[in-house]
Amino acid sequence: MPIRPALARLRLELVRLRRWPVTLVVTGVLLVLVVAARLTHAEPDFPHHPPVACLALVATVLAAAVAERSLGSVRTALLGVLVPTAAVLGTQLAVTVGTALGEAHAEEVHGQPLLAPSVVAVALFAAASAGMPAQRRWRVRTVLWTVTLTLLLFAGHGSDVTRALAALLGTAAGALVVHRASRPVSRDQLTPRTVVVATLVALGGGSLVTLVVPDPDGVLSPFADAMSDRAVVLVGVLLLVAAWLVHRGRRAGIVVAVGVLVVLTAVLADAFLIEPVTDAAVQWQGLGLDEVEWQVTLLGAWLVPAAVLLAILVLRGRLVRAPFRAATGSADLLAMLRGGDAGSLGHMGTWRGNAVWSHPDGLGAVAYRVRGDVALTVSDPVCGADDRAAVIAAFAAHCAENGWIPAFTSVHDPVRAILAPEGWTALPVGVEAVLDVTTFDLRGKRRQDLRTASNRADREGVRDEWTRFGQLDAGQRAEVELICTRWAADRRLPEMGFTLGGFRELDDPDVRLALAIDASGRVTAVTSWLPVYSCGTLTGYTLDVMRRGEGGMPGVVEFLIARTAIRAREAGLSTLSLSGTPLAAHDPASHAVLDRGSRLLARVLEPAYGFRSLQRFKEKFGAQHEPLWLVVPTPLHVPRVARALAGAYLPGLRPRHLWELRRAHRAAAEARS
């Protein structure tokens, strides 16, 4: 009966909910309080803005769930009670002492409610951040402190003071109950750009807050008193736009911020400094404590934007994203490749268009290129295994200083294993086929096609030649170029680049070529092989270019790869990589969203690039499959990184190529029918 599966699913969901007892209790208590408040006509924390109160309630439930997942149920329950209680008591003590001393802000806060649902939310978020990976912890704390300090300085209500104290106590409590192992990747990076962006957000958001909250009384609330409501909205929006542009490393952000702050500083100086001095009715002499405090508050309201303006002018060179410049030579990287370990794809970093970043202490290097504001690495870092985490952390910091999003592209499991525990997002982008040449031969049913190709080559007088591009004569070079360029011209879409080489990458003394030469001496196929080093020793090669010319015998590429594998085995090498297959699923039977998305994209591009056919071709050799990953800081960065990858692999892609892709699909469908 259909009701039984429904009951089973309901029972399963109830079992899952039992794992979140604190979150369920918090949700229930808040629902009871909301209903009771409605029945008694009581007003929430922000009486004139119910959406704000609803947002605070949702944030509290979310904070409880995040804390329970990060800290556990018992710690969440204890911290959710003790931290807000301590914050309320601390605020009450400060208000009482301040009121007794006649402090104006304390007198305003006296009698106001000190506890609100958002206080509990802030306390739990602050405590839970201690158990988060480094990337997420840093972002949560930055947002949390920016919001709490903005409300404290501009709204200045009793609950705002309690909220800021709860954030401080929650952060300290979380650090006490969570013990993290020290890792190089876990170092928090507080860059000048982060500070300036947070400050601009606080000024812009704080200006808008004064229009939303009732009776703002923060120390910076006079900030908006010198302007009309429309001017406050304009200033707030422009400062938020400037913060976003500075965050992206755009020079326009500095221009907007400086322009707004210059005008704002002049207006505030006239309202709070010049006018009081020139007005005979306003005197600084003979003022009581409250009056002097008010004048100091006005001075601070002018001093803060003036200080921010000065900081932006001083730091402007570090706020703008550095222009990307490709490396002019690859000698240093080649030396590191030969002496270190960059994996099977490391030599691709020497190609034209890439830049090389070196670790300040000489621990390693990273080859990368920048598209937009994304730094795309060329596979794994060039370094020893023991230094890999330190090199990755330093490169990520280098990207942050330049306003780039680091995207570790086509990396292997060791890099993913370092970054994933730190909160980075790993996406499957392909599979690399790796041959163990120490046991390679042509026996077995699985390699029947390889034996057939080898036997046919012997019958037709086709031989393989192991050489370099610089050793070819003019005729052979022309034949190789014709094979490569004709293959690219036959594609309906542009030839891919970045980590996929072409004819230009063959002209490299470190790259070996395996040519198929027929009985007449004509080149009929070409494969290129990139060197792979480990700790100063050549351990294998990686397949890059793989082209068959017109008139080449069927199976000629299989023949070249098989002969290269046998040659590598005889030379004492250990591995032969058939390179990565883009968009190949790590688990073909997986129903995960990312794997299904990769398979869908592979099907879309199949008529133009044949990724699925390439994967089936490589399966003939019985190679092991190693997953390749794209690792980015957060899921929010995925769209921008995807756009950068598309620009790196297909810089010549135009809208008309989409029509060509559609025509390719139609042609493939007609061929099948």
Image (cartoon, rainbow, N blue to C red):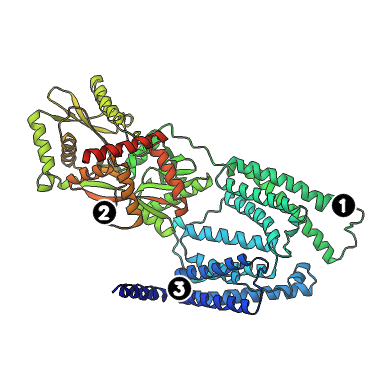
Residue at the image position 25 percent from the left and 25 percent from the top: 471
Q: Earlier in the sequence, mark 2 or mark 3?
A: 3
Residue 413 falls left or right of residue 635: left
Marks 3 and 1: in contact by CB < 8 Å?
Answer: no
In contact (CB < 8 Å): disc 2 and disc 3: no
Q: Is residue 138 above or below residue 580?
A: below
Residue 303 image position (x, y, % from top left): 74, 52
The x, y position of residue 341, in whole percent, is: 33, 46
Is residue 343 visible in the rendered image? The answer is no
For residue 72, which numbered disc appears in the image? 3
Disc 1 is placed on an element classified as helix
Mark 1 crowd level (few <14, some 14–19, many ≥20, 10 Å Cα) = few
- Name the residue tied to disc 1: 277
Vertical comparison of 313 with 78: above or below: above
605 relative position to 359: left or right = left
- Mark 2 highlights which residue? 588
Q: Residue at x 60, y 40 (%)?
A: 251
The span from disc 1 to disc 2 (Cα, nearest Å) is 77 Å
Q: Going 56% across and 75% down the picture, which residue do you hit?
A: 30
Amino acid found under the numbered disc labelled 3: Gly
Can you name the residue that lies furthest to the top here?
A: 474
